[in-house]
Image (cartoon, rainbow, N blue to C red):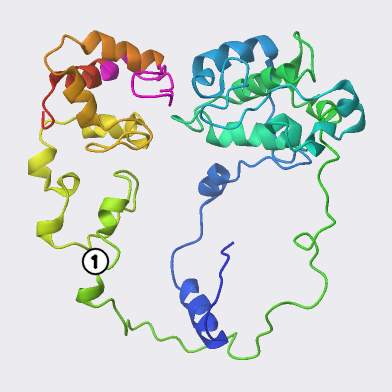
Amino acid sequence: MIGLIFLGSNAFAGDYLLALNALGRTATTAELSAWDIDVRPDFTGLPVGAGSVEQGEVLWLDQCASCHGDFGDSNEVFSPIVLGNITENDIQTGRVAALTDPAVVRTTFMKVATLSTVWDYINRAMPWNAPKSLAVDEVYALVAYLLNLAYIVDDDFVLSDKNIRDVQALMPNRNGMTEDHGLWSVNGVPDVVGSACTTNCAVNTTVTSSLPDYAMNAHGNLRDQMRDYGPFPGVQTAPAAQRSESQSTPSDTLDQRPDDLLSVSGCTACHQMNKALVGPGFSAIRDRYAGQDAAIYLANKIKQGGQGVWGSMPMPAMTRLDDTVVETLALWLASGQLNK
């Protein structure tokens, strides 16, 4: 489904929609299956599986604690997931009383109404440095551990597709979701009523407008404003003389650099080559450890994660990386020469 906001005539809208029909192809069954992994509030889409609180604790400490804290209570990077303020009465009523106190820190389990939301998000987006890498049973185990931290289930609990609906009935804020608002209702008069061309409109695919050369750099070089990874790099809008070092030709900066490993290992999600992103730039790391025998130290940092050397932002543990890959990256970072 494509959502569109039209800021022009209805004729333009019709032309645009008709043009879209001529693009692309029908998605295959395998492609739809890969995309269709959401789990809904009624647990439609939930896969078969199970995981215990004990298993979840091990996974959590290994892959999640560096950002969320050992007990899900850290607000160093993100809002805390669990931080008290949930009572037995809340679990009975399904409404967290502390949410009425503006001084109380809001946590995920204070606010979320549906357990499927927690399961679905972990399954699709976590861990941050390797989303979708968790097995189904591992997701169940992590959710079980969080439920235990929130005092919703006991230490020996095993969460599964068979009992997750029973746990939903214990969610502290399960009755905190309301449908009594305008965004939920589809009744009434629509905001926009179209009567011009909406079907079988003539389509003109000729491009009749473009950005003039003098305006290309009106907002700076767009390429420099984009992250250096992903399928859609920013458009080069600056003259060659104004291009930054990060946009130099490959022969200037890419020679002997392990760029493929930096990308597929997830490093470029947080680090750019010549400037800080979430973490420090690779060039800054190499400058700091130039001339030192730091390869083993850096390999341990990559594998185990850490915090404090470059500020308070933690580095998640990259435990899934092959030792050979870690060694290669560590040796390059410790070599102290940016183009090698």
x, y (%) of residue 113? 78, 38
Mark 1 secondary-structure assignment: loop
Q: Residue at x 37, y 82 (%)?
A: 205
Front residue of 24 and 220:
220
On the image, which quarter does residue 41 sit in?
top right
Q: Is residue 57 above or below residue 41?
A: above
Q: Does the magenta portion include 320?
A: yes
**Residue identifier under label 1:** 217
Using a 10 Å C-alpha cutoff, classify the residue at mark 1 as few (fewer than 14 neighbours), some (14 to 19) or many (20 or more): some
On the image, which quarter does residue 238 sit in?
bottom left
Is residue 96 found left or right of 228 in the rendered image? right
Q: Is residue 107 above or below residue 53?
A: below
- Residue 250 seen in this snapshot: yes
On the image, which quarter does residue 121 sit in?
top right
Determine the residue located farthest toward the front in the rendered image: 103
Where does the magenta region start and end? 306-326
Q: Quadrant of the C terminus?
A: top left
Q: Is residue 123 above or below residue 182?
A: above
Q: Quadrant of the N terminus?
A: bottom right
Q: Residue at x 40, y 16 (%)?
A: 306
Q: Does the magenta portion include 23?
A: no
Front residue of 132 and 292:
292
Front residue of 158 and 305:
305
x, y (%) of residue 134? 54, 25
Q: Residue at x 61, y 26 (%)?
A: 136
The amino acid pointed to by label 1 is Asn
x, y (%) of residue 183? 75, 61
- Residue 200 seen in this snapshot: no
Q: How many marks?
A: 1
Is residue 287 found left or right of 186 in the rendered image? left
